[in-house]
Image (tube, rainbow, N blue to C red):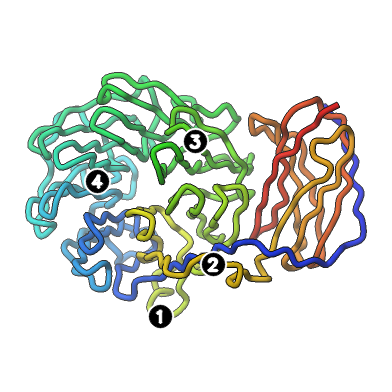
Amino acid sequence: MHSMRLKFLLPVFLLVPILSIAQYNWQALPEAPKSWRCDDFFFLNANLGWAINPVYSYVYPSQYGRIFKTTDGGNTWQLLKDSSATFYRSIGFADSLTGWVGNLGYFSAVSRDTNVLYQTSDGGITWMPAKIPYPHPVGICGISVVNSYVVYAYGPYYGPAGYLKTTDKGVTWTYKDMSAYAGGLVDGYFFSPDTGFISGTGNDGKALILHTTDGGITWNACYHATRTGTEIVWKLSFPSKNIAYASIENLSSTSRNDFFLKSVDGGITWVEHSFVYDYDEEGIGFINDSVGWIGGDNTKPTYGTIDGGETWFSDSTFGVLTPPYQDYIPEGYLPGFAINRFRRFGDTLMYASGNTVYKLNTRVKPTEANLLQNEAFTVGNYPNPFDRQTTISFQMPRPDVNVMLDIFDISGRRIFSENLGPLNKGGHHIIYNTNLQNGIYFYSISTANFKISKAMIVSH
C-alpha cells in the first residue's frame, strides 16, 4: 500500500490548444435504416452495402428484424427482408451475390428462429437457411469474410462457444467446438484464411482474445483478463498490420472501471488502457493508427481519440435529434449512442451503425485553425520522472461536479481513486505526494464527458 497526499494550488486559466476530434465529421445517412440499434452492416465496396436491424420487440412491439441494401454509398436503401422472428446480429458478403446473416439464436430469449445462419445467392433478394452441420453454434454474433471463398461465423456471446467455417463460399461448412477455449464468442479479424483472431469471454467470464495461425486447428490466448468480474472483448479493430485495438464490455454489477486494449505487434500481445468510468463499450473503430472511436453506451456519448487512445473526447457528431430518428429511441435513452459496429475502407472512408447508419467525412483536414476552445482538456505532470512529489496540471474546458483522479500500475490495476470535484473551468494544479516503488504508472483525469491519461515515472 502507499500513502498519498493531494494539495490543490490556485486555478490558472490557460488555453492550451489541442487537435479536436470534431475535425472528423460523422454524418447520419438520411435514408438509412432507423432502429433502436442497427447491429451490423457490410460494404463490399464504397457503393454496395447491406445493413441489418435486429428484432427489438421487447423495446418496440412492431419493430422486427430487417435486411436492407444500398447501391449508392448509403444515399438510398431498399428493404429486402422483414422478419418477425429472427434477431439479425451479423452480416457479411463474399461478392455482390453471395452473403450471409447470423441470428443471435433461439436460446437468447429474443429470437424465435432456430436457424442460426442464412445465405443468399442473389444479392439479398432471397434468403435460405445455410446448409450447416449438426452440432453447430446456437447463435452467430460475428461473421468474418476472409476472401471470396473462406468465411468464419462464430458465437454466441452467451455460449457455448463455437464457429462455422467454409472454404467453398458456403457450399459446405465445418464446425469447431470452442468450449475448451472460450465461454462465448463475439467478433473476429483474419489476415488470411489461416491467420486471425476471435474475441469474447473465457470460461471464467473474463475478457479473451484467441489467435490461430493454422486455420483454426489450434488456438492460443494472446489476451486473457485477470480482473474480478464479467467482461467480454466485444469488437476488434485493425487499422494497420501492426496496430490493433479492442473494446471490452463490462458486464459486472459492482466494478465499473473500464478498459480498452491496444496492440503494437499485430495482435500478438495486448496492453490494457483505462477508458471512461462506468461505460458500456461495444463498437470500436479506427480510421488510421491514431484516430478512432468507441461507442456503445445508450446513456453516454460516443468517444473519439486522435492520439491512439492517450486522450478521449466526446464526439457530438453522433446522435440525430430531428424527426424521424427520435421515434426509434426508447424513453430515457440518448440518440445514436448505441454504436455496435464500425467498418473501415482505407484511410478516408468509414461507416458506423447506431440508431441509424453513419458515414465519416474526412474532407476536413486537421489544422490548428480547427481547434475548439470548449474541447481544450489537457493534463501533464512535472517533474517526470520524480522521486516523492510531482505536480499534476490539467485544463478544464467547462465546470464539472464530478472530476476523478485515478492511478494505475503498469498492469492496469487501479491503485488509487479520488473524486476531486466540483471544479471550475480553467487550469488546476495538484501536488501529488506518494511513496510508490520505482516504476511506470499511469494517472487519469476524467469527467462524464472527458478522459485523459498520461504516464509518470517514479525514480528514487
Mark 3–mark 4 distance (CA, rounded to whole Å): 28 Å
Mark 4–mark 1 distance (CA, rounded to whole Å): 30 Å
Q: Which quadrant of the figure contains the C terminus?
A: top right
Position of 300 with respect to 62 (left or right) is right
In the displayed structure, 16 sits above or below 249; it is below
Q: Amino acid at mark 1?
A: Pro
N-term-proximal mark, 4 vs 1: 4
Q: Which quadrant of the figure contains the N terminus?
A: top right
Q: Residues within 10 Å of mark 4 (few under 14, many from 20)?
A: many
N-term-proximal mark, 3 vs 1: 3
Kind of element beneath mark 1: loop
> Mark 1 — residue?
323
> Mark 4 — residue?
102
Mark 3–mark 1 distance (CA, rounded to whole Å): 41 Å
Q: Give the mark toward the camera: 2 or 4.
A: 2
Residue 263 image label: 3
N-term-proximal mark, 2 vs 4: 2
Q: Amino acid at mark 3?
A: Ser
Mark 2–mark 4 distance (CA, rounded to whole Å): 34 Å
Q: Give the mark toward the camera: 3 or 1.
A: 3
Q: Percent x, y for residue 72?
A: 22, 69
N-term-proximal mark, 2 vs 3: 2
Pointer 2 with pointer 4, Cβ within 8 A: no
Residue 22 image label: 2
